[in-house]
Image (cartoon, rainbow, N blue to C red):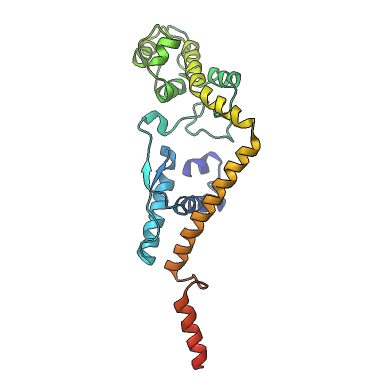
Amino acid sequence: VKTEIQMRNFEASIPVGFFTYPISQAADITAFKATTVPVGEDQLPMLEQTKEIVRKFNSVYGETLVEPEILLPDNEACQRLPGTDGKAKMSKSLNNCIYLSDEPDFVKQKVFSMFTDPTHIRVEDPGKLEGNTVFTYLDAFCRPEYFEEFLPDYRNLDELKEHYKRGGLGDMKVKRFLNSVLQAELEPIRKRRKEYQKNIPYVYEILKKGSEKAESVAAETLREVKGAMKINYFEDQELINAQAERFREG
C-alpha cells in the first residue's frame, strides 16, 4: 500500500480506499475461515493486518474467527515478480504485465522489450544480474529440461548466468530463451482456456455454483460473528424471552 501511495503521488491526499482495502481483504479471508493463504511478498502486510484483526476480534468476543497462516512460494524469485519494465510492482495500470491470456506473439513482444542491464551495451560487455528482469523471470519459470530443448549450448541456468556476467552473451539471445520458456509454461493454460471458451454457459454455471457455495459459507461465518457480538437479535432466544418477560412485568 505504501508503494502504491508513492507511485500514485497520493502522499498529500490519500483516498479512503487505501485504508479500507486491507479491511475488505481481511473480510474476504475470514469469511471462509481460511487457514492458509498463498501470497506474494508484497501481500505480507495485508495478511499481517488480517491476523491482527482476527486476534483483536477473538480477544474481545471469544474464539470465533480463524487466524490464517501465510504461505510464500518456495522459489524466492516468485515471491515478487517485477514488471516487464523493471519496476518493482507488476501492475495492470502501469501496463507492465504478462497475462495468462496473452497470445504467443504478444508475449514475445513483451519479452523482447523487457528491461535488462542498461550498462550491458555491447555483447562483449560484462552483464549484471541484479535488477535484470529477464534473469528474474528465468529464476522464476525456467526448468532444467528447457535447456536441452531450447538452449543446448548451456547445461543449466548457472552456466548461462556466468557467461552473461563475464561478457560475450547478448541480451537478445537470453530474451529468446526466456520467450521459449514462457511460451512452454503458458501453452497448457491457453489450451485449457480455449476449451472453456467453447462453452461459456458451462463457465457461468461453474461461477454460479461457486458463488452459491461461497454465500452459504460466508453467511454461516457472519451468523457466528453476530452471535459472538450479541447482535443476532432475531436468533437470540434468551434476549427475546428476557424482553417478553420485561414487558409482561411492566
Q: Nearer the viewer, residue 63 or 237?
A: 237
Q: Nearer the viewer, residue 100 or 207?
A: 207
- Give the residue drawn at x 49%, y 70%: 232
Which residue ends up furthest to the bottom in the rendered image?
A: 250
Q: Where residue 145 sits in the image (x, y, percent)?
A: 39, 15
Q: Nearer the viewer, residue 186 or 188?
A: 188
Q: Where residue 148 sits in the image (x, y, percent)?
A: 40, 10
Q: Where residue 211 sits in the image (x, y, percent)?
A: 56, 48
- Above or below, 21 relative to 183: below
Q: Is residue 52 left or right of residue 175?
A: left
Tell me the quarter of the picture where residue 140 sits. Answer: top left
Q: Nearer the viewer, residue 135 or 150?
A: 150
- Give the residue drawn at x 56%, y 24%: 191
- Above or below, 3 relative to 125: below
**Residue 95 in view in this figure:** yes
- Give the residue drawn at x 41%, y 56%: 53
- Above or below, 81 relative to 166: below
Tell me the quarter of the picture where residue 202 sits. Answer: top right
- Give the residue drawn at x 53%, y 22%: 187
Q: Where residue 55 sits in the image (x, y, percent)?
A: 36, 58
**Residue 126 in view in this figure:** no
Number of numbered discs visible in the structure rendering: 0
Q: Is residue 80 left or right of residue 84?
A: left
